[in-house]
Amino acid sequence: MKWALLSVWNKQGIVELAADLTAHGVSILSSGGTGKVLGEAGIPFTEVSEYTGSREMMDGRVKTLHPRIHGGILGRRGIDDQVMADLDIKPIDLLVINLYPFEEMAEKDLDLPDLVEYIDIGGPAMIRAAAKNHADVAVIIDPGDYDLVKRALENGGFTQKERLKLAKKAFATTAAYDGAISNHLYSLDCEFPEVYTTQFRNGRMLRYGENPHQQAAVYGSGGIAIQTPLQGKPMSYNNYLDLNAACNLLSEFEEPVSVIVKHNNPCGVARGGSLLDAYVKARDVDPVSAYGSVVALNGEVDAALADELNSTFVEVVAAPAFTDDALALMEKKENMRVLLIKDLVGGREIRTIDGGALVQHTPPYQERWSVVTDRDATPGEMKALEMAWRICKYTRSNAIVFADQQRALGIGAGQMSRVDAAKIAIDKSLYSLVGSAVASDAFLPFPDTLEVAAAAGAVALVQPGGSIRDQEVIDAANRLNMAMVFTGIRHFRH
């Protein structure tokens, strides 16, 4: 390497990198803020404007957009050498650059004229040029990759494999950058942009998809998507789906709670005086379905809980913390995947359909619980209704959930008929439903579901309301002496 161009917004590590380049005889071009930092550190460099013979102009909007800069980056060694020599263009072998922080500034509610000044022009142009000419130029866009430069200096340069890898990362970066700008500008006058651009990184191949004959990968830079087991087999496609469902339901609670999920539906949910107590209660809601399940817990897993988890075949256990003793015990289950999950990232939900995608997000909303029957719910019934409702929100539609104050008692999920969902919940329950509360994820169009629940022993019911036959259902509840609450919010899950 003979020449390197350094132009970075994020100055982390740039002085140390420049010092290494200088020590290995590499000449440095730089400008603006980067040049100032290098100068203050006593590192020799050539100012871009001095090299090009053109001063920076328009408040720095134009500085690197010059043939001597882009010719040095794009010039093909062995092909364009004579042109470069005739025009005194130095071959730039290394470009170290990162971009104006448009996304960060977009979150600060700047006026558009102020925000557009954080749209980098020269930076993406140089990055794309260097990535295109990666056969001769290495492009570094991430301070985390500065160690690659140091190794290349020690080894006599970058390999072609390294250059290509860096070029891929560079193009992905400019694509994401332009996508963020496009999304923001499109969204200025509408909730969802006409053109929606997104990018998922850190792709990792999975053994297969939902079934062995399907291929799959997982992508993501945070939350559940980046998690890999502390121990046990690699995560599968279905494991990730079930873990996502379990953790989202778990986030509804603050007290010790265990959520058990099978095939994207909760099969056991319980709160307890301790996490161990909550897990045992949740498992016992449906111990058959708990076999081969995904378990999410919202506290530290200790040895006693680990021992209990080991007593059943569990595919995945996720929690924010594990004691060393717990991990030692869980190592005995070689097939049990153990994951550390502390916080969910959230954000827009994207689901593909043939030819495109569906995108949705859930803004803050307020449920307005209102008792609509003659009889009010008792405090105990209200707590049971809240439990049933939380579980119901994360159960596939049509969903009916019976619960008491501590746990789910019966879960009917994914049925075309709401009455059938209620019957399944009743049939699956291993407990008496006398005195229980029941939740429906959408309104009851007829009294039949309520009547089935009452016959099983339910004394209170929560639903969104909003049917043209609400009054018929209210009359039925009054006749059966049931308390009924409307929330005003539906929770379909497809």
Image: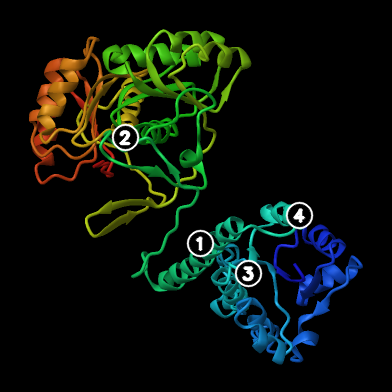
Q: Which residue type carries mark 1?
A: Ala
Q: Is residue 286 left or right of residue 281?
A: left
Q: Which residue type carries mark 2?
A: Tyr
Q: Residue at label 2? A: 394
Q: Is residue 104 left or right of residue 344?
A: right
Task: Name the mark on residue 136.
Answer: 3
Report x, y in % for residue 428: 19, 16
Q: Earlier in the sequence, mark 1 or mark 4?
A: 4
Q: Earlier in the sequence, mark 3 or mark 4?
A: 3
Residues under labels 3 and 4: Cα distance? 18 Å
Q: Which residue type carries mark 4?
A: Lys
Q: Is residue 108 left or right of residue 289?
A: right
**Residue 428 visible in the current orientation:** yes
Q: Residue at label 4? A: 150
Residues under labels 2 and 3: Cα distance? 53 Å
Task: Name the mark on residue 172.
Answer: 1
Callout 2: SS: loop
